[in-house]
Image (cartoon, helix red, strand yellow):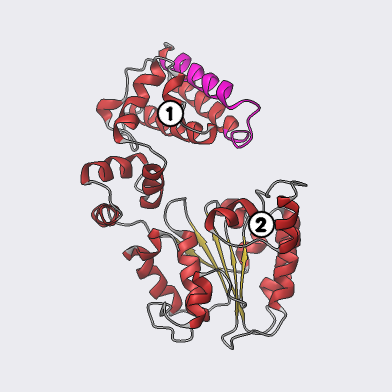
């Protein structure tokens, strides 16, 4: 599990959900709130040999098998890119294809993997605690993959439970959502999040700045820290974009750059209507004479850029174009 699995707000939600019945759960909310960690905590508790009200014991053979990613009664459905990032093994066939470079790891949940999971759900469990299927991020199922899950989700064979976790619940098929009990992820209190970030080794001043830059989402704040986002770099971003300084974005991927600029655009729009900014300190926002219409158009262009940011034709050129567009917008008048 990642560090946030031990966060107190995740533990509270796990205790509450584990006390309820239901064979299929949908955990939804924006990124950075711990959907994956809560889903894994629930699946671990379902399969644990000595479960407690607050969750899995962490010591039994079942918990050990999950920790080393070898539990026979747990099926994990993720895009191959996410599985590799989180340390889950791919199927022998998929790993062989990727090793031989016949294809790249999938960024979607493949229908073949879903069919394997459906077959898995129909087999007898190995440890006598039933079976669990974890799907994350569930929005990465395409229509074909989601439809392959539907009937099993509605009428699960034997003692199998599902937990789907998503950071974009609106993208799921209504038929998937209707077959699950839904839980909306809870936001931690600011002091609670800061205490937790401090426990991960962040200085208090850095934790506060990074939590703000992440919109109050502690796991995203920690990821930003691990990616090298410093509070000073974040504070300097608005001025750098007003100057069209693409070098300020040079250490970011295009996707990270688009997200950062979306946050800047969001806060400038808020300031234009007299509201307090969310991601930046008000004193860090540059003078801006752009109209609401110009800022809204820029935000729409950033949304369009986000669709191709994962696979740009040329990352360097895209960063330069993003900085130039930001400057043109911020320096526009009326």
Who's the residue at 33% across and 28% down the image? Answer: 271
Q: Which residues are magenta?
A: 306-330
Measured as percent of width and height from the top left, residue 148 is found at 75, 64
Q: Is residue 119 above or below residue 233?
A: below
Q: Are marks 1 and 2 in contact (CB under 8 Å)?
A: no
Residue 173's disc is 2
Q: Secondary structure at mark 2?
A: loop
**Residue 38 pos. (x, y %):** 45, 65
Compared to 278, does 302 lie above or below?
Answer: above
Residue 280 lies within the magenta run: no
104 up-or-down from 323: above or below: below
- Identify the residue at horizontal 40%, vertical 30% (top origin): 264
Q: Residues within 10 Å of mark 1 (few under 14, many from 20)?
A: many
Q: Nearer the viewer, residue 282 or 198?
A: 198
- The quarter of the picture where residue 138 lies is bottom right
Q: Is residue 185 left or right of residue 167?
A: left
Which residue is tagged 1?
Answer: 265
Badge 2, how many Cα within 10 Å: few under 14, some, many 20+?
some
């Amino acid at each position: 599990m990642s560090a946030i699995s031990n966060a107190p707000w995740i533990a509270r939600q796990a205790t509450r959900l584990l006390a309820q019945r239901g064979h299929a759960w949908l955990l939804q909310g924006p990124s950075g709130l711990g959907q994956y960690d809560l889903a894994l905590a629930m699946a671990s508790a379902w399969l644990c040999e000595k479960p407690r009200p607050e969750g899995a014991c962490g010591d039994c053979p079942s918990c050990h098998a999950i920790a080393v990613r070898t539990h026979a009664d747990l099926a994990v459905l993720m895009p191959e890119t996410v599985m590799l990032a989180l340390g889950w093994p791919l199927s022998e066939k998929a790993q062989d294809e990727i090793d031989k470079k016949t294809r790249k790891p999938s960024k979607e949940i493949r229908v073949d993997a879903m069919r394997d999971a459906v077959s898995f759900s129909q087999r007898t469990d190995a440890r006598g605690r039933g079976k669990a299927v974890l799907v994350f991020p569930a929005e990465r199922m395409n229509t074909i993959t989601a439809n392959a899950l539907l009937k099993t989700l509605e009428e699960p064979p034997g003692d199998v439970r599902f937990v789907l976790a998503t950071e974009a619940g609106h993208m799921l098929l209504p038929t998937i959502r209707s077959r699950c009990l839904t839980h909306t992820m809870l936001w931690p209190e600011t002091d609670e999040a800061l205490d937790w970030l401090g426990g991960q080794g962040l200085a208090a001043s850095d934790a506060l700045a990074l939590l703000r830059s992440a919109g109050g989402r502690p796991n995203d704040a920690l990821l930003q820290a691990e990616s090298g986002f410093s509070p000073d770099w974040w504070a300097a971003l608005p001025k750098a974009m007003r100057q069209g300084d693409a070098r300020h974005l040079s250490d970011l991927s295009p996707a990270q750059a688009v997200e950062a600029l979306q946050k800047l655009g969001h806060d400038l729009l808020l300031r234009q209507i007299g509201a307090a900014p969310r991601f930046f300190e008000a004193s860090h926002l540059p003078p801006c004479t752009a109209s609401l219409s110009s800022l809204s158009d820029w935000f729409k262009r950033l949304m369009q850029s986000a669709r191709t940011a994962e696979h740009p034709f040329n990352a360097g050129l895209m960063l330069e174009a993003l900085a130039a567009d930001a400057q043109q917008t911020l320096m526009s008048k009326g």
